[in-house]
Image: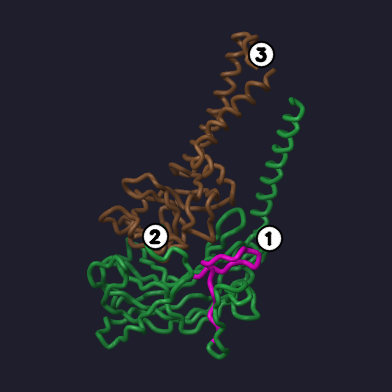
Chain colours: A brown, B green
Amino acid sequence: MFGSLASLQPRQLAAQVLNFALVLSTAFMLWKGLSVFADSSSPIVVVLSGSMEPAFQRGDLLFLWNRGQETQVGEVVVYNVRGKDIPIVHRVIQRFGGGSTPLQLLTKGDNNAADDTELYARGQSYLDRSQDVIGSVVGYVPFVGYVTILLSEYPWLKTAMLVFMALTVVLQRE
Amino acid sequence: MHNTLTRVQNVFGFFTSVAFAAAAAIAISVLLSPQAPTASLELRSVQVVKGRPHYYSTKREEYAHIKFDLDADLTTLFNWNTKQIFLYITASYPSSDPSTIPPSEAVIWDAIIPSNYAPWHQNTYIHPTPKATTKVKKTAKKGKKEIGKAYPAGAQPGIIKLDGQKPKYQITDVSSKIADRSNATLTLHWNIQPWVGALVWTNTKTVGRWQGLQGGEAKFNFPPLKGTEVKKDELKTETGGERNRGSPA
């Protein structure tokens, strides 16, 4: 295998590397373009916990939309707890304010008996729509995101996948 | 090896393309399924008491306990792409400055009604049997036949008949005062969870084959604060089927 690599001209090798970089950057730009379109820092999320069962199971892929600032009760929002980087997918059960004042939301997971007040940061009783919420769920595809859960729980899978992808790109150009 | 690899890649590529196209077709085809939901929602009683309604309440605040009657026919909302319907009833009331701040809204009751094809889950709604017939005991051990359904006996998913239903949540206002507020509205909403595709919320206006919801609204006023004459068991809430009962997950 490495013999075939060595026989490549430098120009061909450069073309290979450039192709690979182009694939990566196209994927990256598609992601960022979707982020701008949906006005969300993370427009596609994977459900990580079972707190919204049976609506969303672990591994479901959610599409977010962040351009609707007047979030209504009953919408499913994804938010970050202040100070932490864990996105939580729960349903809005109360709203106060909006209009000229900041919109305050209280959320609760469908499969949780208690609302999320205990999950919020210390001293925080409500979410601020403009600051804490990443987006509101508008569509979903089941199971597809389970791959990312496997990748995070078994780190060796990540390296194995990268090696496999690199091999296929290199070997195909014979 | 080159040939096998190409074949596997081609098959896998074709599989993903077909799966994607099928999912898109299913998601878009729900627009063709006609809907005609109807509901009749009435307020049974509302009481405003002072106390500690939430597990995290550090001081006493005013909270409202709202009982209602509901008679709904949502069977047409269930189509081939419906996994479940999240039904919820909210109480909304004007804010302190109605010209610039929209009304506040809070959920008092919710229910998850699965379609007949959805796998059983502990968190689904169990429709109470009408008081006229004998009560069906729920045994969690033996078989699914003895577990209550999300609709009355002999009906389909989407039929709800509730009489004097206790709320699941007591509602409070952020200012801790909820007594004597007028122009409040009790409204029925739903959120249709598909097997794949877009989530859909209540539509009151007709869109193509989907007729808007007829009924499902009741206007009321919050009464003045009641004293100690309200019994404790009148203020009990309904327990849902949620699995995580302690701290939220």
Give the residue drawn at x 57%, y 73%.
Answer: B141
- What is the x, y in percent for residue B55? 31, 68
Q: Which residue is mark 1?
A: B32
Q: Nearer the viewer, residue B162 or A66?
A: B162
Do the residues at pointers 1 and 3 share their chain?
Answer: no
Question: Is residue B73 among what the camera can see?
Answer: no
The quadrant holding residue A13 is top right
Q: What stretch of residues is rendered in magenta?
A: B111-130
* Mark nearer the viewer, 1 or 3: 3
Residue type (three-letter) at the residue carrying disc 1: Leu
Do the residues at pointers 2 and 3 share their chain?
Answer: no
- What is the x, y in percent for residue A103? 34, 57
Residue B11 sits above or below residue A14 on the image? below
Q: Which mark is residue B113?
A: none
Q: Is residue B120 magenta?
A: yes
What chain does badge 3 belong to? A
Q: Which mark is residue B248?
A: 2
Residue type (three-letter) at the residue carrying disc 3: Ser
* Mark nearer the viewer, 1 or 2: 2
Label 1 or label 2, whichever comes before in sequence order: 1
- Separation (CA) of disc 2 from disc 3: 57 Å
What chain does badge 2 belong to? B
Q: Which residue is mark 3?
A: A4
Mark 1 crowd level (few <14, some 14–19, many ≥20, 10 Å Cα): few
Quadrant in which the N terminus of chain B appears: top right
